[in-house]
Amino acid sequence: MLFIFILALSQWSYAQSSNERDSLSYKLQRLESTNRFNPKDTTHIKLLIELAFSYRYLDSDSLFSIASRALDYSKKIDYTYGKIKGLNALGDYYYNKGERKKSIPLFKEALDLAMDINDIKSELTIINTMAQNYSFEGNYAEALNLNLKGIDLAREINDQETLSILNENIAGLYADQKDFKNALMFYDTVQKINRRLGNEVIDAETQSNMASLYKDAKDYKNAMFNINRSINTFEKHKVYDWLAYAYEVKGDIYLDQEKYKWALYWYDQSNMLFKHQIEDDRIKIQLMNGMAKVYFGLEKDSLSLEFAKKGLALSNKIKSLQGQIDCSETLYKVYKKNGEDTEALAYLETFKTLSDSLFMDKNKQSLSLLETKIQYEQEKQELIEANEEALAKQRNYIYFSVIVLLILTIITFVIRRSENIQKKLNKELKEKSEAVTQREAQLSEINKTNTKLFSIIGHDLRGPIGGLQGILKMFTDGEITTKELVSFIPKLKTDVDNISFTLNNLLSWGLNQLNGVITKPKRVSLSYLVSNNIQLLSEIAKNKSIKIINQLPDNPRIWADNNQIDIVIRNLLSNAIKFTPENGLITIEAEENGNMWQISVRDTGIGMTAEMQRNLFKNTSNITTYGTNNEKGTGLGLSLCKEMVMKNNGKIWVESTPRKGTTFFFTVPKAQSKYQKAS
């Protein structure tokens, strides 16, 4: 995978040397030792902010401590610039720790403050940081959108350094999608800007990222040329964070060519900087997995395991999906080579599940990247055309005004004509705005449906199928015996049952979403539907020693679609079994309520909190859940139940107490007479 190192803006474009940090510390000490020192003075706050950012990739605890002080002082005196930079620094701290839920709100708050005071420089700094963060987590559409907005702002104030960085960010987005042609096109723009800037450190940063790009494209000659130039510059200027990254990229180039000893040499150089100078887990993950691959190539499997596990631990810590995939793949290969099939299979399943998820996400992100760029260009072109049209109208008004000054009758005519045109334009604008809003809502619903469908297929179907493929491949390759294969059969049966149940629900839900299901009510025996589903699920209940009691009155008749109510009963019974522990009890009852039958499915299971009950039937809820015996579900069943009950003019709700049990209720119309007509 190509990893583009994060670029920072303006005075923090590369990590400050120890001399510069020492200089800042000395200035700070001198200021704090004066008789008139006030910690809330803006000069003191600015020095704190600069010092905090100098620890950005070197000492996260120092970054947090100093930035917190600066933010606290800024809030006390309502110093907006200090609040912006303090929030930005703390956002960096939490993001580098993998705590995005804490970092993104801080960035957004800082961006709002910068926009309030029209501080474009700060806006650009925050936009760049947020874009890089979205890029790192794979949200390329949002990253591209932010970078494009940043480019417009940078052009507005003619900030060439920021233009270089933002164009390089976009190059990195295309590189991560393996679109080397577009990536190189943006890098060409970056290098032209860099030549105008004449800053060899910024140029070296670009060369490091281009070396990584060329390595992924298998162009090792250009990769080595660029990385050697960048290393010389970073060593000369003692830019240690970028130097650690450049050493790691050079190791990657040698590893790609299976020159393990040279790769190990450069990885060791990078690792020394991480031990003594640098603190950046994102780069360290790539380094740990690279060293694991090198030792695997050198047949030093114990060392390979050690570094791969370190990389996986860091990936889990900062929630790096790509790091988890890469390290799991390496661990699978090492365990497989050493004949440890159980461990190998576990890491293979992890690798395949995460890879399938990432592959689907990247396919969607590739489309989103293209759509965002097209949308942005269209909006920009429409704005240009609108401005040109507005200017043309203004010129026309000037001409009319000159004529109006000469002839009073023409003045009256022009005013009235202009009013009519304005009303017509306002009407057209309103109609177009309503059409755009309606289209946006439709696209939003389509996107939600696609996201839900892809999530279920990617996580709840591909996972078990991938595991089945892995086991069968190991059997056909002779890696496990027939006896060992037989031991997997209970797990495979459970996976196949889950797949079958999920596919039935998915098919029903999918047809429903595409308006392909028409409700056809008729007289239906509720007793038959309940008995049939109890028999269908009896084996699963028996495996957990769960007793199902049918307490329906004598032959109740309902007026509903037979297939749809069958799906509702099956899903509610299945849920009750899944969330009821062994030796539990499930009771099905029905009672008359006016012209409706009220059916209840009561269990003695684990129950739900009030918050879970509020979110239970939401269409946006598609989270995988696990039962008392670790049974897997898609979160689709209850959403489907709600849709089916509503199509039959009924209601569905739940009552539950944690650790005591849950009761699902739903209503359907009574069958009034044998000759009742469909509505």
Image: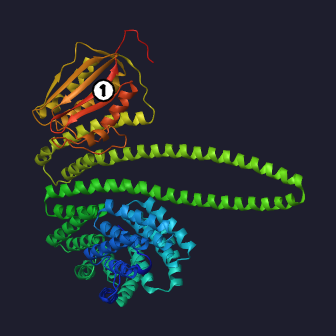
Count the numbered circles shown.
1
Occupied quadrant, residue 37: bottom left
* Colouring rule applied to residues: rainbow
Q: Secondary structure at mark 1?
A: strand
Disc 1 marks which amino acid? Answer: Phe
| Residue at position x 43%, y 70% in the image | 80
Between 416 and 281, the one lying in front of the other is 416
Left or right relative to 597: residue 226:
right
The N terminus is located in which quarter?
bottom left
Image location (x, y in percent) of residue 258:
28, 75
Decide: is 87 above or below 535: below
The C terminus is located in which quarter?
top left
Residue at the outermost front position: 36
Between 409 and 574, the one lying in front of the other is 409
Q: Which residue is mark 1?
A: 666
Q: Residues within 10 Å of mark 1 (few under 14, many from 20)?
A: many
Image location (x, y in percent) of residue 634:
29, 42
| Residue at position x 33%, y 43% in the image | 621
Between 139 and 182, the one lying in front of the other is 139
Image location (x, y in percent) of residue 532:
24, 22
| Residue at position x 39%, y 19% in the image | 521
Occupied quadrant, residue 16: bottom left
Image location (x, y in percent) of residue 516:
44, 31
Occupied quadrant, residue 235: bottom left
User: Residue 174, can we see it?
Assistant: no
User: Residue 106, can we see it?
Assistant: yes
